Amino acid sequence: MQMKLKLTGTKRTRSNAITYGIVVLAFLLVQIVDGTGNLTSSLRGQLVPICAYIVMAISLNLTVGILGELSLGHAGFMSLGAFSGVIVSVSLQESIVSDPVRLLVSLVIGAVIAGLFGIVVGVPALRLRGDYLAIVTLAFGEIIKNVINTLHVGIGRNGLRISMTDQASLNLGEGGTVIIQGPIGAVGINKTSTFTAGIILILVTLFIVLNLVHSRSGRAIMAVRDNRIAAESVGISVTRYKLTAFIISAALAGAAGALYALNYSTVVARKFDFNTSILVLVFVVLGGIGNIRGSIIAATVLTVLPEMLRAFNDYRMLAYAIILIIVMLTSNNDQLKQLIQRATSIFRRNKDSRRKGEESTHA
Amino acid sequence: MTFLSYLISGLSLGSVYAIIALGYTMVYGIAKMLNFAHGDVIMVGGYMSFIATAHLGWPPLASVLLAMVVCTALGIVIERFAYKPLRAAPSLAVLITAIGVSYFLQNAALLIWSSNPKSFTSIVRLPSLKLFDGELTVSSVAIVTIISCIIIIIALTFVIGKTKIGKAMRAVSEDKEAAQLMGISVNQTISVTFAIGSALAAIAGVLLCSAYPILMPTTGSMPGIKAFTAAVFGGIGSIPGAFWGGLLLGMIEIFGKAYISTELSDAIVFSILIIVLLVKPTGLMGKKISEKV
């Protein structure tokens, strides 16, 4: 028994190491390709968004895969992180000169704000079940989009000013800067996000999520997912663990949002709509629900895929839709599943018998 | 007087939401799936009617019939090829497939009809009604929409409550396996449900475009989301719930726009939805779910 536990422990460490390794390897690979000048400019522009989407996918996987609740408004948290990150970055333009430090502060505050809203949404919403929870998160995403769309924020002599009506009522005085202009969004952002920062954020996200999953809390969260009533009856506080996972997930989405927004000179609230939430959900489902490594790969492939499909020109989004449907249909096809299972079992049997043969010769 | 005119436009918008929500709720009740492609079927219905009237010169009523026939066929085809193979799959897989279908319909429409908005000519060509010495003007589209919604809900209640296929639908939604044992063809019943839902979506599409005459490949998505919210608002799976949910949502939206803020109307609608769900976690008329260990 002791042996077995230890074995799964080392197996787990190895699996985690592979996940971290893939990220680091991908980083090095991109650096090499970029160094030799083989990286196309369209792909280079995608690097930071890919990192942001990977963090989004891991964070949503925490909610959907580990916690087992469907969220259709994850882009709302991303939006909160994005705009609070931008506000922080612009406000601290003078006080913090170093770009990486300012980026770090923006990411942290973006994550904190999104996490706080995670509490606001999570406390009431997590009482609901299944599809009703999904609807509340959807509604929350739409509310955030709608409110930020009417928001005017500026910084002037009197500090940070917020208005829901128009720019004039901000009363910034001379030398003030307008940060968010309602439906036009945030303009004139100093691009501080870098690919390296994105990779570091992915690694930090992985560290947080993988450690959470394999901790006492993580096991409690998964127990709640698998059978809420059974978990409750053995003394697990359902609300507490659900909320923990949800807040961490929201905060990570906020950090991803800040990273994403600080990669562009302008960002609008409409970017973080229902479609973005769905896009990230597609990453999670295609990567495998609860499978963190799968999320990383799916987010990368599906962000690059539309670029690769450029050869199809106008047909590329149509092709994307068809690929999505076909993948869902084949991956859930029972006959195909049986076929694969049979193939792998034959393969495994061969391997086993070979190993047995080796053992007998040794003996 | 202005209050009355807001009330009527709220009821008219609410009726459109109700007709769409009925499709959502019927499909959910039977197939236990959120059919996110439903909103795009509305869009297809709008385009069909547009082509029939603007290009082929058909009379309005014939164009509505064409839209209904095409959407019904579309609904059956979607169900047969995209959802039926996933009957036993986890619900998230079905949800993603529905999203794939939605992307497909939107992008196919984009290729066929381009992203340029088409201006839709209302199918109701009657003069608007003037009441109280011309102080209150009620558009004929609003009246037709409200009347259509009432006819649809009565017809639907009759079909589900009194006919054989309605009985089959209720049986399948209650317990698929037991229904099958009683000799009901589950697949056929689900097909019929999709067909009815899609035909309703076609009607909703035509009415929606008659009231808000801009037709684009993305026309269906926002009303789709709102109607879906309406269905949840009323308690998803419940027919009267979808009707009242739709009407209420339409009125909240119009009154919110008129009296609180035009820009924040969506935020108001969704906030009220959240509040309702917190007080009544399964919607206004939803069944209470008891859990067994």
Image (spheres, rainbow, N blue to C red):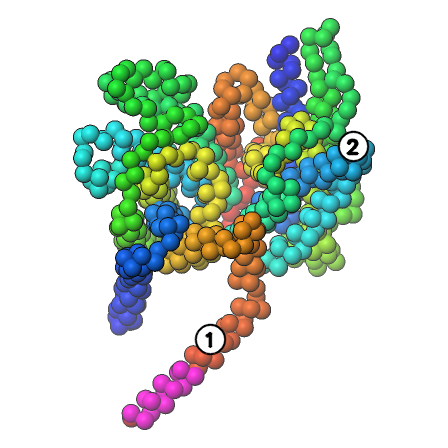
Of the residues tagged 2 and 1, which is closer to the observer?
2
Looking at the image, the residue that sits furthest to the top is B133
Asked if residue B38 shows in the view, the reply is no
Magenta part of the chain:
A350-362
* The image quarter in which residue A26 lies: bottom left
Q: Is residue B56 left or right of residue A195?
A: right
What residue does disc 1 label?
A344
Q: Secondary structure at mark 2?
A: helix
Residue B174 versus residue B189: which sits nearer the camera? B189
Task: Determine crowd level at label 1: few under 14, some 14-19, many 20+ residues with C-alpha closer than 10 A.
Answer: few
Badge 2 sits on which subunit? B
What residue does disc 2 label?
B60
Q: Position of residue A151 (x, y in %)?
A: 39, 25
Q: Secondary structure at mark 1?
A: helix
The answer to whether residue A185 is above or below residue A343 is above
Residue B160 versus residue A325: which sits nearer the camera? A325
Cα separation between marks 2 and 1: 60 Å
